[in-house]
Image: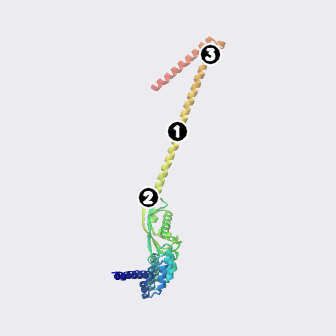
Amino acid sequence: MEFMVFPFLILVIAAAALSVFLHFVPIGLWISALAAGVSISLFNLVGMRIRRVEPRMIVLPLIKGTKAGLSLNVNQLEAHYLAGGNVDNVVDALIAAHRAQIDLSFEQAAAIDLAGRNVLEAVQMSVNPKVIETPTISAVAKNGIELKVRARVTVRANIDRLVGGAGEATIIARVGEGIVTTVGSSEKHTDVLENPDHISQTVLEKGLDSGTAFEILSIDIADVDVGRNIGAQLQTDQAEADKQIAQARAEERRAMAVAKEQEMRAYTQEMQAKVVEAEAEVPKAMAEALRSGHLGVMDYYNLKNIEADTEMRDTIAGNGRKNRKET
C-alpha cells in the first residue's frame, strides 16, 4: 500500500511544479509569437511575470500589430501597460489609422489613451464623421417672436488636438450661442423662417471648433418652430406692473387725504372749543362792566333787544330760503 501512495505523491508534486513552471514560463504564448513571426525571448516573458505584467496583454496585441504591418516595440507596449493604458485599444487604433492612411504614431495614441479618451473611437470618427444633435434652443428675434431651433452638427475628430482639446459639450454650447446671436440680430422672425441656411452660414463663420478636439464640417438646421410672442408678453407684464404702481400711489394719496381730513376735523373741534371758551367769558365781562359802571341797565336791555332782533331776522331768512328750495 505504501508503495502505491509514494508514486501518486510524486505525480502530484510533479504536476504542481509543472503548473507553476508553465505559469511563470508561458511556453504556449512564446510558441504562438514565434509562429506569427514576432521576435520575443522566453526570458522576456518570464521577466514580464516578475514585473507583474500579464504577458498575454502584451504578446497578443504585438502579434496583431505585426501582422497588420506595424513596427511595434515590446518595451513600448509594456511601458504603456504599466502606466495604466489599454494596450489592445491603442494597437487597434494604430491599425485603423494605418489602414485609413492617417498619420498617427504610437506616442500620440498612447498619450490620447492615457488622457482618458477612446483613441480607437477618435480614429473611427476621423474616417466616419459624427453627427451631434443639439437640444432645442430658444431664441427671440427683434420683433419679439420666439423661435425654437434644433441643429445637427457634423464633426470630425482632430487627432492633433485630442489631448487638451474641448469635447462635445463645448461644441453644443458654442453652436447654441451662435444660433441665439443670429436669430436675435434678425429684424423679423419670418426672415429666419424664409432662410434657415443663414443661421448655418453665420455660425460656421465664427470658427466654433477653435480649441476643441473636433473639426466642424457642417451645421444643418433640422427644425425651426415658432414659439411665444415674448415681446407682447413683456409689454403686458410691464403694463400690469405700471398699473400696480399707479394703484399703490393712488392708495397712498387717498390715505394721505384721509389723514388730512381727520387732522382738519380735530383742528375744527379745537377751534370750536376755543369759541365756546371765549363765549363763556362774555357774561363775565358784562357783569364786570355793570359792576364797574361802564355799562348801564338800559344799555344792557338795548343789547339784548338787538341780539333778539338779529336772531329773529336770521330765522326768518333761513325759513325763506327753505321755502324757495321746496318750491
Q: Amino acid at mark 2?
A: Arg
Q: Which residue is mark 2?
A: 228
Where is the C terminus found, in terms of image quarters?
top left
- Helix, strand or loop at label 2? It is strand
Question: Coloured how?
Answer: rainbow
Q: Estimate the x, y position of residue 258 in percent, counting from the top left.
A: 52, 36
Looking at the image, do the residues carrying marks 2 and 1 touch, with CB atoms under 8 Å apart?
Answer: no
Marks 3 and 1: which is nearer the front?
A: 1
Q: Amino acid at mark 3?
A: Met
Q: Estimate the x, y position of residue 165 in percent, counting from the top left.
A: 52, 72
**Residue at 51% across, 44% down:** 248
**Mark 1 closeness class: few <14, some 14–19, many ≥20 residues within 10 Å:** few
**Residue at 54% across, 19% down:** 311
Q: Amino acid at mark 1?
A: Ala
- Helix, strand or loop at label 1? It is helix
Sequence-first tag of 3 and 1: 1
Instruction: Say which of 191 and 151 sits in front.
Output: 151
**Residue at 51% across, 42% down:** 250
Q: Whole-Å distance between the Cαs marked 2 and 3?
A: 88 Å
Q: Is residue 185 shown above or below 7?
A: above
**Residue at 46% across, 57% down:** 230
Q: Is residue 149 shown above or below 251?
A: below
Q: Whole-Å distance between the Cαs marked 2 and 1?
A: 41 Å
Residue projecting furthest to the front = 2
Q: Estimate the x, y position of residue 290 in percent, counting from the top left.
A: 64, 13
- Helix, strand or loop at label 3? It is helix
Looking at the image, do the residues carrying marks 3 and 1 touch, with CB atoms under 8 Å apart?
Answer: no
Query: In the image, which disc is placed on residue 255?
Result: 1
> How many labels, in total?
3
Query: In the image, which disc is placed on residue 286?
Result: 3
Where is the N terminus found, in terms of image quarters?
bottom left
